[in-house]
C-alpha cells in the first residue's frame, strides 16, 4: 500500500453499513451467480448501494483488493513454486509485466534486493501438477527474461498457510 493509500485509508470513517458489509464478506463472497446481490439481500440493502460502498472502500484503500484465493492443492496443483529472479533494473518493469501476463503465473511482483544475501528483485508464482511441470514453466520465464536475468531460483511450498483478509 502506498503512503497516499495509507493516508486515504486512515481518513476514511467506517459507518455501520460499511462494517456490516465487511463482516458479511470477510470470510469470502457466496458462491452464487450474483454474489454481491446475495450479500445485499442478506443485509437488506440495494445491490447498487453495496457495490458502490465496496468500490468506495477500495478507492480509499480500506479494502485493498477483491479476488479469488484458490486452494491450489485442491485443484490438483501439488507443486507450487515461487520463482525469484535477478533482473536488470532498467528492464524490470517491462519484463515484469510480460511475466505477470503469462497464463501460468498467478501473481508477479517487484521487490527490493537485500544484498548481499538476496539478489532477487522479481517474484513470480508458478503452479503445476508436479515439479517437472513447474520447471518447464520456469524455463519459459527464463527464456522471456533472456540476458536481462542474472540469477534465479525456485522456492517450493511445503505447507498451506491460512490466508485471511480484513477482519472486524
Image: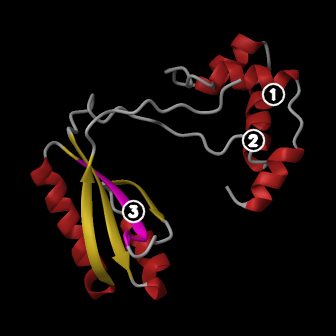
Which of the marked residues, 1 or 2, is nearer the chain's N terminus? 1
Residue 62: image tag: 2
Image location (x, y in percent) of residue 17? 84, 23
Local packing at callout 1 (Cα closer than 10 Å; few below 14, some 14-19, many 20+) is some
In the image shown, does 113 or 83 lie closer to the viewer? 113
Report x, y in % for residue 143.
22, 77
Are the residues tagged 1 and 2 within 8 Å (C-beta)?
yes
The scheme the figure's colours follow is secondary structure
- Looking at marks 3 and 2 on the same chain, the residue that comes earlier in the sequence is marked by 2
Give how far apart the Cα atoms at labels 1 and 2 are: 10 Å
* Mark 3, residue position: 123
| Residue at point 27%, 54% (across, down) | 155
Q: Is residue 124 magenta?
A: yes
Q: Secondary structure at mark 1?
A: helix
Q: In the rendered view, does 48 fall on the left or right side of 92?
A: right
Residue depicted at x 83% and y 54%: 7
Q: Is residue 148 above or below residue 31?
A: below
Q: Which residues are magenta?
A: 117-127
Vertical order, 140 against 49 (above or below):
below
What distance separates the C-alpha of mark 3 from that of mark 2?
26 Å
- 27 or 156: nearer the viewer: 156
Q: Estimate the x, y position of residue 28 in percent, counting from the top left.
A: 55, 25
Amino acid at each position: 500500500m502506498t503512503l497516499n493509500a495509507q493516508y486515504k485509508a486512515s481518513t476514511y470513517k467506517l459507518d455501520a453499513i460499511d462494517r456490516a458489509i465487511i463482516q458479511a464478506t470477510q470470510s469470502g463472497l457466496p458462491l452464487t451467480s450474483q454474489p454481491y446481490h446475495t450479500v445485499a439481500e442478506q443485509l437488506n440493502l440495494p445491490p447498487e448501494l453495496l457495490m458502490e460502498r465496496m468500490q468506495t472502500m477500495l478507492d480509499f484503500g480500506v479494502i485493498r483488493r477483491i479476488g479469488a484465493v484458490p486452494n491450489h492443492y485442491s485443484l490438483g496443483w501439488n507443486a507450487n513454486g515461487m520463482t525469484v529472479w535477478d533482473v536488470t533494473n532498467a528492464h524490470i518493469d517491462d519484463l515484469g509485466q510480460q511475466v505477470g501476463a503469462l497464463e501460468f503465473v498467478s501473481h508477479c511482483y517487484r521487490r527490493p534486493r537485500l544484498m548481499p544475501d538476496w539478489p532477487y528483485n522479481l517474484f513470480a508464482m508458478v503452479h503445476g501438477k508436479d515439479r517437472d511441470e513447474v520447471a518447464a514453466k520456469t524455463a519459459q520465464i527464463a527464456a522471456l527474461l533472456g540476458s536481462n536475468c542474472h540469477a534465479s531460483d525456485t522456492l517450493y511450498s511445503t505447507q498451506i498457510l491460512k490466508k485471511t483478509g480484513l477482519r472486524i
